[in-house]
Image: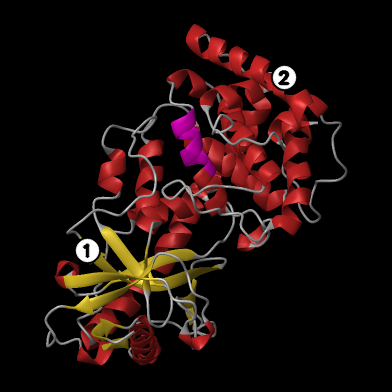
Amino acid sequence: MEANTSLWHSYLGVILSRERQRMEHFQRAEDILLTLLESVHARDPRFLVDYARNLEAFEFSVCASEDAVTLEVPLRIDGDTLRVLARRSSAEQGGHPAQLHTCCLELCSPGAGLEDWTGAVDGMEHCLLPGKILQHLKELLVSAIVRCQRLFLLQPGDISAENLREDALQLSLLIRGSWKPVRFDIVPVVRRQQEPLQLRRRQSDRGFPAGSLGRATEEAHFVPASPLCWRSSTHLPLLKLLRGVDSLQGPRVDSLRLLDQLREQDWGGQAGTGPLTFQHLKMVLLWSTELFPSPEDWQDLEGSVYRLLVILLRCLATQHLPHFLNPEENLFQGAAPDLASLYHKVESFAWDPQRFLHFHFGLHGFSGSCQADMETRALLQLPSKDGSCWDTAYFDILLSQFQVYRIQDSARRSAASQLLARIRQEIPQQS
């Protein structure tokens, strides 16, 4: 089962060799965008310019494809003076479907210079309306592009605004970096520090640096969910957690880099298309950090990659990837038709990584499938009602199936053996 160690590191080495160039590419595009946002701020100081973009730059450097970069533009609003009112509407205006856990943000004291951004929602007066804010920001962006070009602050071709849509909940700009444009999805955000981000999961730093979960969620961010309503955003909290993972020992983020390159090259995920995205893999890494908290799990690159792989395979087999901060949310919802084909591609890599650990150009390298172990496939598809299949012992069993289980902890080995014995007793009863 083990691929040659040098093959793993050679493949990763090529990925890392391009990182500096990607960072320069991002920074040039970011400089252009900041020039544009400074012009917007000069016209309307309610739109703030946040120069601390190291988290977005870090994520861009890790991601293999040219996925869009989400950039939140903070509003000059004291979020702690707003009243947050939960809303579960059956219909929304403008063709936007209703979402669970949306809310209205109502001004407690009208007259704060926000009258042009407010309106009535469900009989509540003076609610901040995302639709009005987005429309105003769009107009300012277009005006700023024209102004900066006239002042020769921007060169022809630096920015394309052709993706700015009337009904979009983010404003997309293509900005020239070096050899390719970077797409920025600009989103206005209201920050509220009065209470932390509300999580629908247990509070635990297991596997993460102490206090990292609390620091990542110490304030709530609200972004547009529809022209009328807002939703809580986990964009920055997840980026903070990813940066925290990178501070830990072991090739954890390198494992993410490697799998994302495979996604881009062999699994049909170019430029954010396809059922599997970088954001999905990022979520898998966060789960693997919690489910494999021991430094013993992250001693080498191959073993680290398989920690992510067994979780990814389980999610593909069950067509369910829980959000790390809100586990009741299934990030694979609606992607079922494409997940079966993707599952076989990822499974093929897990059984025979040597076939994939090389770079190729033109047509994608995946062809055919592997001869999978039927017991492993049965374990991956095992139904679970008690949560035992989302636990370290269960994933330890899968690591053992792929012959990459090199854990010496006797308690962990005993827990995995006991769970496997129980599963083998139950499987015949389910068939």
- Report which residue position mark 1 lands on: 192
Question: In this figure, which colouring scheme has been used for the structure?
Answer: secondary structure
Kind of residue at badge 2: Arg
Q: Name the residue under label 2.
A: 424
| Badge 1 element | strand
Picture coordinates of residue 285, whole percent (x, y): 51, 40
Position of 311 compared to 164: left or right?
right
Q: Distance between the residues labelled 1 and 2?
A: 50 Å
Which residues lie in the magenta part? 284-291
Query: Do the numbered discs 1 and 2 sit on residues whose CB atoms are within 8 Å?
Result: no
**Marker disc for residue 393:** none
- Residue 183 lies, with reference to residue 407, above or below; the image says below
Tell whether position 148 is magenta: no
Residue 409, above or below 343: above
Quarter of the C terminus within the rendering: top right
Q: Is residue 230 depicted above or below 271 in this figure?
A: below
The residue that appears at 19% across and 72% down in the rendered structure is: 82
- For label 2, the crowd category at 10 Å Cα-Cα, with few meaning under 14, some 14 to 19 and many 20 or more, is few
Q: Where is residue 286 in the image (x, y as percent from the top left)?
A: 46, 40
